[in-house]
Image (tube, helix red, strand yellow):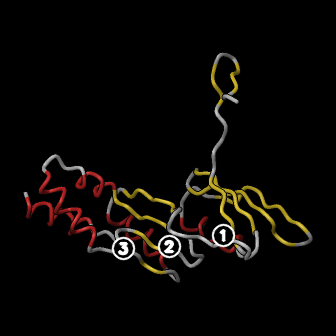
Amino acid sequence: MSPTTGGGQTVMPEISTCLWFDDNMMEAVDFYTTVFPNSAVNQVSHYEGRVLAAEWTLDGQAFRGINGGPDHAGFTETISLSVSCADQSEVDYYWDSLVAGGEPGPCAWLKDRFGLSWQIVPTRLYELLSDPDPARAQAATAAMMRMQKIVIADLEAAADAAG
């Protein structure tokens, strides 16, 4: 099956992330929509008096979720949501908001209080890791490997010391 065409244009299917929660999806959705700007709960479905599924947006990105019960393996680091941050204040805000009640991990990773993994990454990290000077890139990578929350000034200092 291929994408459909309408009026001479290819129409691609909408792709969104669907998350399986035990029975606390609405608590998570309410939390996430307060952390991210331009976010909203769009639809909630019920079954036998309980919340079954929901659709929401986080800063314009579509998500779906279900309260599927405990018959799943839970969230693991094999899937994470990545937040690209413009500067240190954004890194601090998203890191501090999402790690509250959860646990920090290495190299910009954390698990929130619902067990979902996130990467809180400043765009400056990508720039430093791909620096044309291999010594600067390697020094920035080594500095990142020692961090939990990324501190841009420390990455830049490490790269500058190598360059």
Quick one: label 2 or label 1, which is nearer the N terminus? Answer: 1
Which residue is label 3 attached to?
106
Between marks 3 and 1 in the image, the one whose residue lies nearer the viewer: 3
Quick one: label 3 or label 1, which is nearer the N terminus? Answer: 1
Which residue is label 1 attached to?
30
Residue 140 x/y as whole percent: 20, 62
Amino acid found under the numbered disc labelled 1: Asp
- Relative vertical location of residue 145 with respect to residue 16 in this rendering, above or below: below
Amino acid found under the numbered disc labelled 3: Pro
Neighbor class of circle 1 (other Cα within 10 Å; few <14, some 14-19, many 20+) is some
Mark 3–mark 1 CB contact (< 8 Å): no
Between marks 2 and 3 in the image, the one whose residue lies nearer the viewer: 3
**Direction right: furthest residue:** 48
Quick one: label 2 or label 3, which is nearer the N terminus? Answer: 2
Residue 101 x/y as whole percent: 53, 83
Mark 2–mark 1 CB contact (< 8 Å): no
Between marks 2 and 1 in the image, the one whose residue lies nearer the viewer: 2
Q: Quadrant of the C terminus?
A: bottom left
Which residue is label 2 attached to?
98
Looking at this view, is 33 or 136 the one in front? Answer: 136
What whole-number distance in Å separates the C-alpha atoms at marks 3 and 1?
A: 27 Å
- Relative vertical location of residue 5 with respect to residue 67 in this rendering, above or below: above
Amino acid found under the numbered disc labelled 2: Leu
Neighbor class of circle 3 (other Cα within 10 Å; few <14, some 14-19, many 20+) is some
**Direction top: furthest residue:** 8
Residue 149 x/y as whole percent: 35, 72
Element on which disc 2 rests = helix
Q: Quadrant of the N terminus?
A: top right
Neighbor class of circle 2 (other Cα within 10 Å; few <14, some 14-19, many 20+) is many
What whole-number distance in Å separates the C-alpha atoms at marks 2 and 3?
A: 15 Å
Element on which disc 1 rests = helix
Q: Residue at x 33, y 54 (%)?
A: 123
